[in-house]
């Protein structure tokens, strides 16, 4: 399926030339279009403000028919991001049964940043964090800020 | 929606009255009618290869489709595969891949396929009226994902496929593209539907099969003249092997259709390292390959500058003259040393700047450390203060209490010492008084004793000298009268002594 190379190239160009707000995109390895490294700044005014989060976007070989996978390589305290070394982000549009080929990576990035701005505890992967988000918002915000400072403040 | 459908119906009925009828009448079109040969890429008004669902007849088509299920999609897949096989078999030489074309301007968004994000190539329309490239849709159907049988956009089940309207294909045809041989030098722009003709028939930069029957190589079209240009030629002068074709390209980068002996002459004149050249300074004949060295070292006439130029010697001229000059020029003599110094200096400067940047790095790190240290020390102080504040209230009151006790004890102790001292003084006084009294008594006794001793002496002397009993009795009476104590002794002695008298 070599047809997707051109599309991926175009999308990469789009993401580097007019990147979504607060994102910088580059390839992990110049010779491999399927692995992207994204530095996402925490949205202003959110609890993640000031953080620089490193994300890995992996495109499957049969992209765009199958969804890309988004991993947070920087630890982040968030109900929709798994708290393990994978840091998988649970984004509705990225689920295999939700994904549509017309979706674009630039929109995935925008959605991901939107989720940082407003977590979605009803669709959580970390249930304990989601509980805390619902019941003890102050405690949640404090931990999230601490983690942002601790893990995501470096460049 | 109904209004929309009506409009479409009107449009088609008005413009292509026979379209719907003919498609309806034809029903399924069988594969043999399709022509998918690669050479027909410019056939953009491609014939419907699956039954068109004629607009305006949607309900009838739907019922037709329901009865046949997904057969048409399967048919489509079969056809696309057929097409692939054909193209791979016949495809030794396929000039244009439409997918790799570069568009001159960004096409309208409505002409873009959502799957490949490029302008549609052979668009097909689904029953939900979404349009995709034929090949993209094929990839989607073959992708094996759960929703492969649904429209990639709206997820309606795919029931039928039909060609898109002429309007869309015409809009796509009109798009302007860059010739795919642009990297080789063709700077022409073309409408997309003519690009195939251009490349396959006209483009001078397109590589086409060599006309020679026994040669399997390719050659740019502009060099075609009916003979094979792939034979190796040997330059008489430099013994370099090259193809005739390369000779042409190297010597004449601009387009040339004439191929003659001059190619070889050109090679010798312009490229061949063994070609003879005349040095323009000293008129010496030299091989091309030796010319550079001749200029750098030998040529007597070539203008050079004095070695001392770097520190200001203005002398320039032919090498012979400058060499003579340099023998006497003090600046030229100094120049090598100065140059060395300069080099060393620049090296040092580079090192210094490197060290400076390192220093800056270190300073920033140090600042960071200092800041964190300050932070730490303030936090430590704060903690210490906090711990003191909690434990101190108890101990302070305790200390006061203890100090009070201590003061009390000290007072008690002092008063006790005072008491003891005054007692001691009083006792001492008593003692002194007593001893004085005793002393007086002792003195009086002593005096009395002396008196008595005198009387005793006198009495004993009286007894020794006189024998008068009367006197003795008088004396004894006198003694008795004086002192009953001593008289006792005196009486004893008197009582014992009388028999002797």
Image: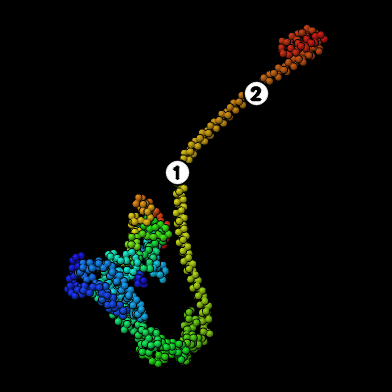
Which quarter of the figure is the C terminus of chain B placed in?
A: top right
> Which residue reaches farthest front?
B67
Chain of the residue on which disc 2 is drawn: B
Chain of the residue on which disc 1 is drawn: B
Residue B462 position (above or below residue A72): above
Say yes or no: labels 1 and 2 on the same chain: yes
Disc assigned to residue B382: none
- B334 vs B469, left or right, is left
Count of numbered circles on the image? 2
Dot 2 surroundings within 10 Å: few (below 14), some, or many (20 or more)?
Answer: few
Of the pair A49 and B36, the residue shown nearer to us? B36
Q: Which residue is mark 1?
A: B390
Residue B193 seen in the current view: no
Of the pair B15 and B432, the residue shown nearer to us? B15
- B29 vs A94, left or right, is left
Of callouts 1 and 2, the N-terminal one: 1
> Residue B277 falls in which quadrant of the image?
bottom left
Q: Which residue is mark 2?
A: B435
């Amino acid at each position: 399926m070599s047809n997707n190379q051109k599309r991926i190239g175009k999308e990469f160009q789009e993401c580097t030339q007019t990147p979504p707000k607060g994102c910088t995109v580059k390839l992990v390895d110049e010779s491999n279009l399927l692995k992207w490294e994204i530095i996402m700044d925490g949205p202003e005014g959110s609890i993640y403000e000031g953080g620089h989060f490193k994300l890995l976007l992996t495109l499957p070989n049969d992209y765009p028919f199958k969804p890309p996978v988004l991993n947070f390589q920087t630890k982040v305290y968030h109900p929709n991001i798994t708290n393990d070394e994978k840091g998988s982000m649970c984004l509705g549009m990225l689920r295999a049964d939700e994904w549509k080929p017309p979706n674009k990576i630039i929109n995935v990035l925008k959605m991901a940043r939107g989720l940082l701005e407003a977590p979605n505890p009803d669709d959580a992967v970390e249930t304990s964090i989601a509980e805390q988000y619902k019941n003890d918002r102050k405690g949640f915000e404090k931990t999230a800020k601490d983690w942002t400072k601790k893990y995501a403040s470096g460049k | 929606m109904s209004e929309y459908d009506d409009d479409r119906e009107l449009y088609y009925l008005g413009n292509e009255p026979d379209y719907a009828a003919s498609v309806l009448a034809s029903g399924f079109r069988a594969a043999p009618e399709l022509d998918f040969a690669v050479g027909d890429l410019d056939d953009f008004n491609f014939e419907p290869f699956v039954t068109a669902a004629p607009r305006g007849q949607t309900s009838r088509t739907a019922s037709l489709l329901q009865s046949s299920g997904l057969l048409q999609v399967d048919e489509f897949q079969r056809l696309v595969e057929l097409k692939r096989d054909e193209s791979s078999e016949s495809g030794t030489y396929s000039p244009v891949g439409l997918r790799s074309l570069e568009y001159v301007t960004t096409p309208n968004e409505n002409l873009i396929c959502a799957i490949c994000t490029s302008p549609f190539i052979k668009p097909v329309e689904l029953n939900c009226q979404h349009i995709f490239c034929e090949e993209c849709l094929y990839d989607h159907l073959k992708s094996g994902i759960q929703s492969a049988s649904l429209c990639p956009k709206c997820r309606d089940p795919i029931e039928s496929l039909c060609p898109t309207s002429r309007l869309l294909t015409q809009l796509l045809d009109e798009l302007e593209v860059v010739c795919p041989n642009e990297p080789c030098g063709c700077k022409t722009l073309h409408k997309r539907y003519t690009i195939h003709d251009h490349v396959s028939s006209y483009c001078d930069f397109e590589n086409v099969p060599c006309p020679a029957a026994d040669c399997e190589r390719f050659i740019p079209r502009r060099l075609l003249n009916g003979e094979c240009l792939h034979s190796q030629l040997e330059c008489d002068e430099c013994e370099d092997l090259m193809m005739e074709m390369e000779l042409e390209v190297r010597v004449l980068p601009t387009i040339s259709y004439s191929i003659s002996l001059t190619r070889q002459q050109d090679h010798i004149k312009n490229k061949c390292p063994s070609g003879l050249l005349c040095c323009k300074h000293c008129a010496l004949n030299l091989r091309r390959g030796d010319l550079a060295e001749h200029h750098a070292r030998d040529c007597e006439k070539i203008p050079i500058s004095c070695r001392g130029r770097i520190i200001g010697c203005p002398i320039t001229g032919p090498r012979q003259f400058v060499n003579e000059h340099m023998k006497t020029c003090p600046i030229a003599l100094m120049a090598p040393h100065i140059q060395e110094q300069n080099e060393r200096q620049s090296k040092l400067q580079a090192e210094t700047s490197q060290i400076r940047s390192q220093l800056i790095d270190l300073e920033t790190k140090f600042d960071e450390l200092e800041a964190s240290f300050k932070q730490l020390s303030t936090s430590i102080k704060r903690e210490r203060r906090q711990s003191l504040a909690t434990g101190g209230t108890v101990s302070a009151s305790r200390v006061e209490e203890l100090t009070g006790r201590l003061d009390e004890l000290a007072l008690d102790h002092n008063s006790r010492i005072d008491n003891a001292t005054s007692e001691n003084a009083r006792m001492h006084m008593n003692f002194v008084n007593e001893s004085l009294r005793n002393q007086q008594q002792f003195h009086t006794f002593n005096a009395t004793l002396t008196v008595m001793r005198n009387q005793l002496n006198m009495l004993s002397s009286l007894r020794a000298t006189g024998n008068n009993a009367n006197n003795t009795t008088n004396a004894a009476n006198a003694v008795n009268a004086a002192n009953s104590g001593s008289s006792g002794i005196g009486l004893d002695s008197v009582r014992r002594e009388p028999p002797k008298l």
